[in-house]
Amino acid sequence: MFSITRMRPFGSGMQMLDRDHRAISEILVELNGLVAREACPALQLRLLKELGQLSAVHFALEEGMMSATRYPSLPAHQLRHRRMAEEIRRVTASWSAKTAPALVQPAGLLWESHILHVENEDLDFGRWVNGFRSPKPVRACKVAQLEEAVAV
C-alpha cells in the first residue's frame, strides 16, 4: 500500500511559491494518510476540494510571476499546470464514500506529480529568475519585489 510519511523541503528561492508548495504538500500528506487508513471519507473529499482550490490559486500566482519575468518556458509550464488541475478534478469527481479506498493509487499519483513538478519545473523557474537577476546581493531584493508586485 502506498504511504507518505514525511514531506520534502522546498527551495525554489521564492517564498510565496514555496509557502504554497508546503501547503499543497501538507494537504497531500494528510489525504494520503487518510486514504491509506480508509479513514474519514468526508474529510478526504474536503481535502480534495481544498487541494483543487489552492492549486488553482497557486498556478495563477506562479504563471503571473512567470509572465512578469518573461519566462521562456511559460507555455509548457501552463500546460503542466492544466494537466495537474485536470487530474485533481478527475480524482475529486470520481470520489465517493464507497470508492474512497480505491483512492490509494490516484492520491499517491497526485503526490508524485506535485513533488516532481516542484523539484523540476518550479525549481527551473527559480533558477532562471535567480540567474536572470544580477549576482549581486540585490538579487534577493529583486525577487521579493517581484513577489510583492504579483501579490498586489
Image (spheres, grey):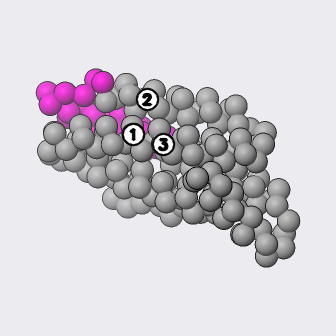
- Identify the amino acid type marked 1: Gln
The residue under label 3 is which amino acid type? Val
**Is 60 or 131 nearer to us in this picture?**
60
The residue shown at (14%, 45%) is 39
Report the residue marked by disc 2: 87
Residue bearing mark 1: 53
Mark number displayed over residue 57: 3
Q: How many labels does the image show?
A: 3
| Badge 2: residue crowd in 10 Å (few <14, some 14–19, many ≥20) | some
**Residue lying at 63% horizontally and 57% vertically, measured from the top left:** 147
Mark 1, Cα crowd under 10 Å, few <14 / some 14-19 / many 20+, is few
The secondary structure making up most of the magenta span is helix
Q: Can residue 119 be seen in this view?
A: no
Residue 53 appearing in the image: yes
What percent of the width, then of the height, locates residue 83? Answer: 52, 28
Residue stretch rendered in magenta on the structure: 93-113
Q: Residue at x 69, y 62 (%)?
A: 145
